[in-house]
Image (spheres, rainbow, N blue to C red):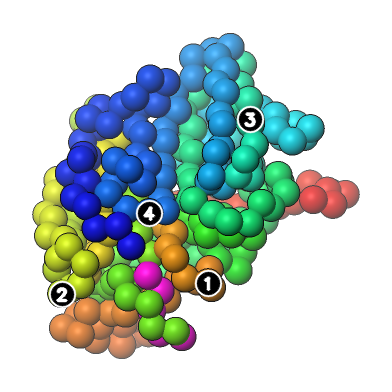
Amino acid sequence: MTTNEPSLGFHVQAGKAADGPYALDIDPGRAGWDYSSLRVLDLPPGGSHQLATDDSEWIVLPLSGGCTVITEGETFELHGRDSVFSGVTDFAYVPRDAHATIASGAGGRFALTGARCERRLPARYGPASAVPVELRGTGNCSRQVNNFGAAGVFECDKLIAVEVLTPGGNWSSYPPHKHDECRPGEESELEEIYYFEIAEAHGNEGVGYQRVSPSGHGRNTDVLAEVRSGDAVLIPDGWHGPSIAAPGHAMYYLNVMAGPGEERAWLICDHPDHGWIRSTWPDQPVDSRLPLYEAPEAPAGDAR
């Protein structure tokens, strides 16, 4: 795996990695690694964008608003959502070595999650109704995971992508865990990007906090970042967590992962000093604020 220092730094503040039509553009070259990419595309009403996928597979995921994705002779109408805090969204998969047109009549903000890959899979639509919504942890470790692009849920070659929603005052990505070694059946080697949005409250912008500590592998990444909406954190290695939501401000993050393993799997190792916290979860209730929302039911007669 490439081990160059990222040209952007590990904490990428909003606007610092803007490029052309993208509010955020992180590719393997800028990240100093081999696989994972993330772009955030802002489209004005009536706007459109041409995407050349090159050597990567991509999922087009609405963050706010809806869009049309035209690729491989298919047209996918993505209904989207008002915001990441309002509901599960549908999405579209675009294969490597393809071109796609992304257009939005009303405008919106769209995440393009990508990974360098080898197999060329077919373009597909992912309905919101098929996204598993998982409640993970209990007590003040409670969080919601929207597993739209998780391994075993939606087929990709290398890409793994999920959304995590953490109520204000809670810790997620906890206990700290890592996936920076290839240990078959125990741990996957995966590069990871966290992209954040923080809910406003009483007209005020919120903040969150992200910790990454050295694991003794790779670059010994060491980050303690105050994150705001539009920020990203690059995690080539290390123990990552906690991700802390400030009281009163729900926190969203989008995880994008990919790596060299033959098996597309999310296998993690808990930090030995903190893994015990899992044993306390059965004795506590899940935070009553969760789920923030659930996936919609499939329309009657929908065969997708």
What is the magenta range?
185-189
Residue hosting label 2: 216
Q: Earlier in the sequence, mark 4 or mark 3?
A: 4
In the image shown, does 47 or 182 lie closer to the viewer?
Answer: 182
Which amino acid does the dot numbered 2 rest on?
Gly
Q: Earlier in the sequence, mark 3 or mark 2?
A: 3
Separation of residues labelled 4 and 3 (CA atoms): 23 Å
Separation of residues labelled 3 and 2 (CA atoms): 41 Å
Residue found at x 20% / y 85%: 272
Helix, strand or loop at mark 3: strand
Q: Earlier in the sequence, mark 4 or mark 1?
A: 4
Which amino acid does the dot numbered 1 rest on?
Glu
How packed is label 2: few (under 14 Cα within 10 Å), some, or many (20 or more)? few
Residue hosting label 4: 34
Residue found at x 41% / y 51%: 36
Lateral position of residue 12 relative to residue 161, left or right: left
In which quadrant of the rendered view does residue 24 lie?
Answer: top left
| For discs 4 and 2, the disc positioned in front in the rendered view | 4
Lateral position of residue 138 relative to residue 144, left or right: left
Separation of residues labelled 4 and 1 (CA atoms): 15 Å
Q: Compared with residue 37, is residue 173 higher up or lower down, i.e. above or below?
A: below
Q: Earlier in the sequence, mark 4 or mark 2?
A: 4
Q: Residue 9 in the image: x percent, y percent? A: 17, 44
Q: Earlier in the sequence, mark 2 or mark 1?
A: 2
| For discs 4 and 3, the disc positioned in front in the rendered view | 4
Residue hosting label 3: 100
Q: Are marks 4 and 2 in contact (CB under 8 Å)?
A: no
Disc tally is 4
The overriding secondary structure of the stretch rendered in magenta is: strand
Q: Which mark is residue 262?
A: 1
In the image shown, does 29 or 130 lie closer to the viewer?
Answer: 29
Q: Compared with residue 153, is residue 299 higher up or lower down, i.e. above or below?
A: above
